[in-house]
Image: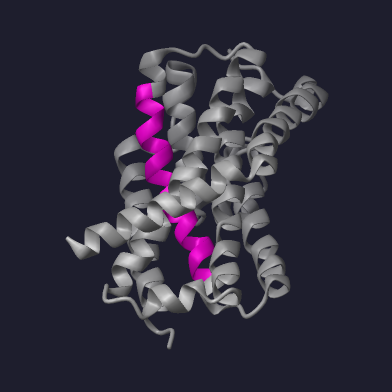
Amino acid sequence: MSELRAILTLWQREVKRYFRDHTRVVSSFVQPALWLLIFGSAVRINFAAPGLTYQEFIFPGIIGQTMLFTSMFTGVTVIWDREFGFLKEIMVAPVSRLSVFVGKMIGNATDAVVQAIITYLLGFLIGVPISALTFLITLPLMIFIAFGLVCIGLVIASFMGSLESFGVIQSFVSLPLFFLSGALFPLTTAPVWIQAIGWGNPLTYGVDLLRSAILGSAWTPLIPIGYEILIVASFDVGLMLIGTWAFGRRK
């Protein structure tokens, strides 16, 4: 019970900290809206996909972007907690390092999913059909994808000694993950070298799962959906194991 209580306490702390940061909540609405309305409108005339506008095409990609950037940013909380001594306190608590990591992971994943839901609701601005059934299909995928992305931020932060170092590495990791995931352009029409990198990018399959769920029959998955789920699941489990090890190595 103490392990479950620790996980629940850390989850509550991360969620409360997110909702008390009004700037983050507002930016979670503004930034995706700018991508959809300005970027999507500016280049849509150059996009060719039967039955889809460019804004509809990038909409799932922007949801993936929101989760990626939010998840990576959550690594900052680890560095802040270390600076103010809170991390030391929870590390010496009579609970396992696994519970500490899982609690922070679930809490930060909740933040990422909340922002993804806000972005999802923006679909009405560009005419993407939003229904309760589509949302119920998309929500578990958001949670599923967020776990692995949050783990990336936590793993990076566990090896960083300062906010400045984390910011540099975060951008170095998150930007290639986003731009090479097919979020903004069809991966199959990209140059061969971009395709090669894209196929090895786990976010590619996460974005494609969201695209299949939101656009339905208007979108053909890159590979069978079952394989995409397996790839994302393997990514999640692998990053959770690495993250648990990274937290466990701290003195």
Which residue is painted at 50% across and 36% down in the image?
114
Which residue is painted at 50% across and 44% down in the image?
111
Residue 32 lies in the magenta-colored region:
no
Q: Where residue 208 appears, x then y in whole percent?
A: 48, 36
> Which residue of the protein is positioned furthest toward the bottom in this rendering?
251
Residue nearest the observer in this picture, 226 or 178: 178
Q: Quadrant of the C terminus?
A: bottom left
Which residue is painted at 44% across and 48% down in the image?
109
The reply to whether residue 126 is visible in this rendering is no
Q: Where residue 132 appears, x then y in whole percent?
A: 39, 14
Please determine whether, in this image, residue 210 is positioned above or below residue 149: above
> Which residue of the protein is positioned furthest toward the right in this rendering?
42
Residue nearest the observer in this picture, 146 or 198: 146
Q: Main secondary structure of the magenta part?
A: helix
Please determine whether, in this image, residue 93 is positioned above or below residue 132: below
Residue nearest the observer in this picture, 17 or 105: 17
Tell me where residue 115 sits by quadrant.
Answer: top right
The reply to whether residue 133 is visible in this rendering is yes
Count of labels in the image: 0
Residue nearest the observer in this picture, 85 or 47: 85
Q: How is the image coloured?
A: one colour
Q: Where residue 102 appears, x then y in whole percent?
A: 34, 61
Q: Where residue 168 appears, x then y in whole percent?
A: 72, 68
Provide the residue span drawn in magenta.
136-156
Residue 137 lies in the magenta-colored region:
yes
Tell me where residue 156 sits by quadrant.
Answer: bottom right
Q: In which quarter of the image is the N terminus?
A: bottom left
Which residue is painted at 45% across and 61% down in the image?
151
Please determine whether, in this image, residue 234 is positioned above or below residue 187: below
Q: Relative to 129, is 232 on the left or the right? A: left
